[in-house]
Amino acid sequence: MSPATTLAAGARLAGTPLAAEDVSDHRALIISLFVVIVLVTLGITVWAGRQTRNAVDFYAGGRQFTAFQNGLAVSGDYMSAASFLGIAGAIALAGYDGFLYSIGFLVAWLVALLLVAEPLRNSGRFTMGDVLAYRMRQRPVRTAAGVSTIVVSIFYLLAQMAGAGVLVSLLLGITSDGGKIGIVALVGLLMVVYVTIGGMKGTTWVQMVKAVLLIGGTVLITFLVLLKFDFNISDLLGKAADNSGKGSAFLEPGLKYGLTATSKLDFISLGIALVLGTAGLPHILIRFYTVPTAKAARKSVNWAIGIIGLFYLMTIVLGFGAAALVGPKEIVASNPAGNTAAPLLALHVGGTGSTWGAILLAVISAVAFATILAVVAGLTLASSSSFAHDIYANVVKKGRATEKQEVAAARWATVAIGIVSIALGALSRDLNVAGLVALAFAVAASANLPTILYSLFWKRFTTQGALWSIYGGLVTAVVLVLFSPVVSGKATSMFPDADFHWFPLENPGLISIPVGFLLGWLATLLSKEEPDAAKYAELEVRSLTGTGAH
Amino acid sequence: MTTDAGPPAQENPPGEPAPRAAGAALPSAAEFAEVQQSPQFGELRRAHRNFAFPLTVAFVLWYLLYVLLSNYAGSFMGTKIVGNINVALVFGLAQFLTTFLIAWWYAHHAATRLDPKAQAIKNRLEDGS
């Protein structure tokens, strides 16, 4: 039921491309801007590739980014198309509940700031697995960390790919199967090129450019909307409520998450997963390795909180602005899930039929496209890094791989992940897979976060505990979703014609997060294994002081 | 930066020093253990945990309160305050505000209470005294 879910609900239902007559007029302009974005990002990639010489460059961008640069890149890595288009659309159609959804994404950063970013930067090198396996038996824990990283990233990646297919089809008015597959293949190909050639340096710059474009585009539209209401927020809200056809209920909780007792519980489950999941997302965690010190990691999280917070504040204006100025009828006609609310709003504030409107529509479409590219690049890098560094170098080669072999393995893994995600993306193009974003957050919160926190802060934690919390949290979350309405039993399910669901909630976090924490704790207490006190001393001192940080 | 030494593999026999890279020698296991037991490090640990742990619990509960009120106290949340601005919206904006404030507060705490202690311990360890 989240905007993320509805993003792909649109995939299946979307018959009418965005305001067809407008698009055919402006398709050339939109395509030219897409081409510009592709060329600029490829240019950055080639430039970054020339400066990528060793493993530190490839995995961590040379660790020389400033806190501000990394703050921008973190924001660019985090704010997906589901945030930009999904939340604006959710507010435009469900009012306050769309806004309610957005808040968990911001509050979550405090967990990363207070508990995770600095210790991770101080004690790890390239991946989440570095910290999880630090004081444990390397091979089993590295394997578990790699599996969890790849599962989380692939779920997230699939949702983004599907979203890209829907979005670009809508914006360009492509409805044929071949066209949609072509778009998925193009996005997949671009992400492979960014990551194999540019590594973390290229990916970081692409994410920074995207963040600037996204914030720039959002500030512009927000300003234009506010201008129409003389900067009177109350008027804007009033007009939005009037136009929504729902009156003041539009500004109150309940239109989306408050429908039934189950949907209320589902939202609690989603909210907890968002708040606790962010600090366990591998593609976010590896960004902290790109700055020279833990202090810089802290500052980059603070920049990210500022940028992401500002962005979600502006989304309120975009969402209610779309309700007020475009109206639900036109939004739903273009895309039932509301994903084109922001581009339509751009068209309207510029003036439908005017050149300004056309330009703004094209700019916002291009921003959305850049958003998708930057996020998929980050996800691909996270999974291929973990494959090469955790699984290949430390499990298969038992720590004896040369740096060159490791980076080569990462590049090949990128190609493999690209092929797999293009194939899965093409196969699932008509399935509602965007619920996978929520699943990615739930797995991150159930499998990764408990293990990270125990590893860093609990002296007694053991290898058995780590394995149980990772696999236990992961399996619980995935199994619950498999048997939830996300997959079957509902018109909006991935397989609407089948029904094998028995778990009532779409979001497993309410169960799987406590299970992850509990299993890690129980397995530690029940195993006869002695914790490695010397290693914990080393990890604890390093994580808090930065001694010997890379 | 090719001198990175990874977190040493656990398979090393206990007590054997971690594999080191030239120029970035890690202190020995004994040195780490000694520092971990030292009162200075205890102070640093407390300064971090006593700040971060309760505050984390507090902001998670504060967020949950907001979610629960949105879910189960619709009429209270719908109370209008000024014009079309109701309690729900103000509560949501308050979440933004508290997030910004906590981020700033932690940064301030870290810069004044954590960084100097951490730096002193790090200097002592890395100078190999």
Image (tube, coloured by chain):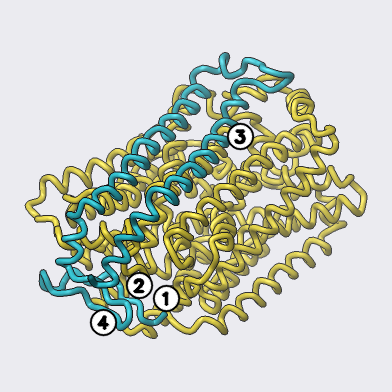
Chain colours: A yellow, B cyan
Mark 2 and mark 3 in contact? Answer it, CB < 8 Å: no
State the mark number for residue A400.
4
Q: Residue at x 31, y 52 (%)?
A: A452
Question: Residue at label 3?
Answer: A99
Q: Residues within 10 Å of mark 1 (few under 14, many from 20)?
A: many
Q: Is residue A258 above or below residue B11?
A: above
Q: Position of residue A409 (x, y in %)?
A: 39, 79
Mark 4 and mark 1 on one chain? yes
Task: Find numbered disc 1 in the image and state the secondary structure of the residue it sits on.
Answer: helix
* Residue type at tag 2: His
Q: Is residue A536 above or below residue A324?
A: below
Q: Residues within 10 Å of mark 4 (few under 14, many from 20)?
A: few
Question: Residue at label 2?
Answer: A389
Question: Residue at label 1?
Answer: A410
Q: Residue at x 42, y 82 (%)?
A: A408
Of labels 2 and 3, earlier in sequence is 3
Q: Quadrant of residue A390?
A: bottom left
Of labels 2 and 1, earlier in sequence is 2
- Number of labelled discs? 4
Report how far apart the C-alphas of labels 4 and 3 lie in the structure.
Answer: 50 Å
* Residue type at tag 4: Arg
Task: Find numbered disc 4 in the image and state the secondary structure of the residue it sits on.
Answer: loop
Report how far apart the C-alphas of labels 2 and 1 lie in the structure.
Answer: 8 Å
* Residue type at tag 1: Ala
Q: Tell me if A212 is positioned left or right of B45 in this view.
A: right
Mark 2 and mark 1 in contact? Answer it, CB < 8 Å: yes
